[in-house]
Image (spheres, rainbow, N blue to C red):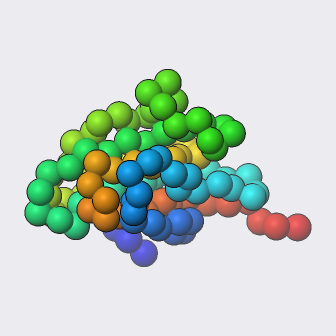
Amino acid sequence: MDSYAPGSLLAQLQDLSASAQLAYSATLQTEIQHICVCNTQTATTRFDIYHDDGGNRYSAGTALFFKESINGLSTKLISADNPGIKSDKTGALTFSIYGTTQRAR
């Protein structure tokens, strides 16, 4: 298990477009505990993380982190729930979402 975050890996994605995208949508009751943002390139870049219950309105009005800077070759640990993501540099960041889900009946 990753030492950065408890829980299971729920989703992992690399931002490959210039527009905001849904990072994770729960089908069972879910508690997102942490998001690890890893900059795999040497240059500093910025990212956004959004929370929108509908999962389709990503703007400054739904931002949890907006234009947050992350140094090259580094990782940030963030707490968030029902996130959408965006990066200033396509392919520079990997977002890993950790949490726990309700057991299916």
Direction left: furthest residue: 42
Quadrant of the image occupied by residue 8 = bottom right
Quadrant of the image occupied by residue 16 = bottom left
Q: Quadrant of the N terminus?
A: bottom left
Direction top: furthest residue: 61
In x, y percent, where is residue 18?
A: 38, 51
Q: Is 88 displayed left or right of 84 in the figure?
A: left
Q: Residue drawn 63% across and 43% down?
A: 55
Q: Is residue 21 visible?
A: yes
Q: Residue drawn 28% across and 48% down?
A: 88
Q: Residue drawn 44% across and 48% down?
A: 19
Q: Is residue 79 visible?
A: no
Figure check: 29 above or below 54: below
Direction front: furthest residue: 18
Looking at the picture, tell me which residue is in the foreground, 19 or 27: 19
In x, y percent, where is residue 68?
A: 27, 39
Q: Quadrant of the C terminus?
A: bottom right
Q: Residue drawn 37% across and 36% down?
A: 65
- Counting the numbered discs, the total is 0
Q: Is 92 displayed left or right of 63 in the figure?
A: left
In x, y percent, where is residue 42?
A: 11, 63
In x, y percent, where is residue 78?
A: 38, 47
Direction right: furthest residue: 105
Looking at the picture, tell me which residue is in the foreground, 45 or 17: 17
Figure check: 50 above or below 74: above
